[in-house]
Amino acid sequence: MTFDSVVSSLRSSGQPFAIATVIAVRGSASAKPGSKAVIDSSGKNVFGWVGGGCAESFVARNAVEAMGEGRTRIVVADLDDEIFGLGMPCGGVMDVFIDPQSPPERVVVRAPLEAREALSHLGAGLGYALEFAEPLSSGAASILDSISGGTTTPAEAMVLALARGVAQTRGASMRSLRETKGVFGAGSIANQDWISGESEFLIMGSSRITEELARFGALMKWPTRVYGWNLDSSLYPSSVVLQTAAAGYADLSVKPGTLMIIASHHKGDHEFIEAALKSDANYVGLIASEKRSRLVFKYLSEQGLTDERLKRIYAPAGLDLACRNPSEIAMSVVSEIALAKKAAQS
Amino acid sequence: MSDQELLLKHARHPSHAGDPSLHSRVGTCRNPLCGDMVDVGVTVIDGVIKSIDIRASGCGISTASASLMTEVVDGRSLEDALSSLELFNSSLLAPVSAGWPEQIALLKPFQRLRESPTRVPCALIGWFALKDALAKGES
């Protein structure tokens, strides 16, 4: 029995479990940094060691709570104070990182029969266990709503339906983040002319997020290009064009109607946005925190960009899906683009 | 003597340490996660606990709590004993800043466990063993 085999077996069983790892020890403790234990949903240590007795019980109890909350936690095990610590006067203090491993998240989506197989495949690839409600039941996302707009492709409708299901499952608003966290807030978004025809999906940067954005671009059948550095073709769909940026971004070209998403973690933010706005991009999004979005807007404003121009920028980019990983960030961005396109064309 | 010293004294030398099986009512409680265990034996006459013995093995808190429990309930009615358990339980789970009830003043040294909620079960093992003994009735 190995750590990997135990984890793999628990994962296949669909039961929640947690991995506890000792990340620091001060003083004396029987477990050492890097020691791991696997704890099942009942709190039983099924593999490994992070200390015995009260320390094990303490970690197990915290692991069960962390599984219930679905959140990681770091706990401090006091092995110094026999009475008010953990009852074991070993003479040290141990920090333990507890990482709950949940079964796939259950997401309810309302979709017609013919779309369910493709949606199931997409959902499974993103780590969800999809359930399909009847089209007219309340509280579930509907792919029919998305299709009814007339300008949305089946792939876009499918991603929108999944995004709605995820948002509803988590109680997220699915509102554009620039409305809730952006510089200009709700109600001050510029009306935008949308250049019709095939738009290039231009992804700026190089990271796990750009890989996921490219995957969604290919799924949407949008002509997709990644402009970045250290681009590894094995990590991108074959239909995606990869362009390594030249010094000073001298080789950057942006076509009118482009859908540009900037995921470069601050490198080139200003240059990319200015290039996009000059070229009449249909969508300019910046994946950034609220704070960094404000900093970029301040800089661009100082460079002479008017508020009317700045209001065309989606920052922070994406919809509120309570995103937890790069795949979901990418899904939130392409969903925002699909909705913006639908709104501009309808 | 500080709270810590008092509890350590009870953990090292518990009151009423003896053979629970000699009593007519015997109860037990185990924490399978950490191995703490307490057995309690009580003799009840006319609804009053006339004598009590415990056998405890576990962490300092579980042993000290079982020890102090015997001092609280010895000579008290069954109703008083069970209400002390309820009061102790709710007091441990109360906010850190809440006061400590006068009826269980002897148990006030455990008040600091409010800051370490994962150790509250340790303090209740002896009490649950007592409850088990009282629920079983005469053997």
Image (cartoon, coloured by chain):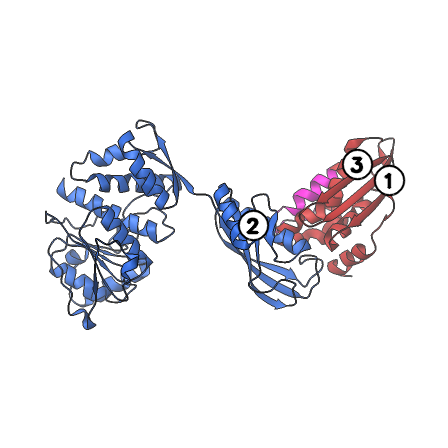
Chain colours: A blue, B red
Q: Is residue A206 above or below residue B111?
A: below
Q: Whole-Å distance between the Cαs marked 1 and 2? A: 37 Å
Three-letter code for the amino acid on which mark 1 is drawn: Ser
Q: Whole-Å distance between the Cαs marked 3 and 2? A: 32 Å
Q: Is residue B73 left or right of residue A45?
A: right
Task: Indicate which label's residue lies in the foreground, 3 or 2.
Answer: 2
Three-letter code for the amino acid on which mark 3 is drawn: Ala
In the rendered image, residue A211 lying in the magenta stretch gets the answer no
For this rendering, which residue is in front, A169 or A113? A113
Q: Which residue is mark 1?
A: B21
Q: Which residue is mark 2?
A: A63
Q: Is residue A99 above or below residue A344?
A: below
Identify the magenta region: B83-101
Q: Chain under label 1?
A: B
Other residues around mark 3 within 10 Å, as few (<14) / some (14–19) / many (≥20): many
Three-letter code for the amino acid on which mark 2 is drawn: Ala
Residue A255 in the image: state x and y as whole percent. Answer: 11, 57
Q: Which mark is residue A91?
A: none
Q: Which residue is mark 3?
A: B133
Other residues around mark 1 within 10 Å, as few (<14) / some (14–19) / many (≥20): some
- Marks 1, 3 in one chain: yes
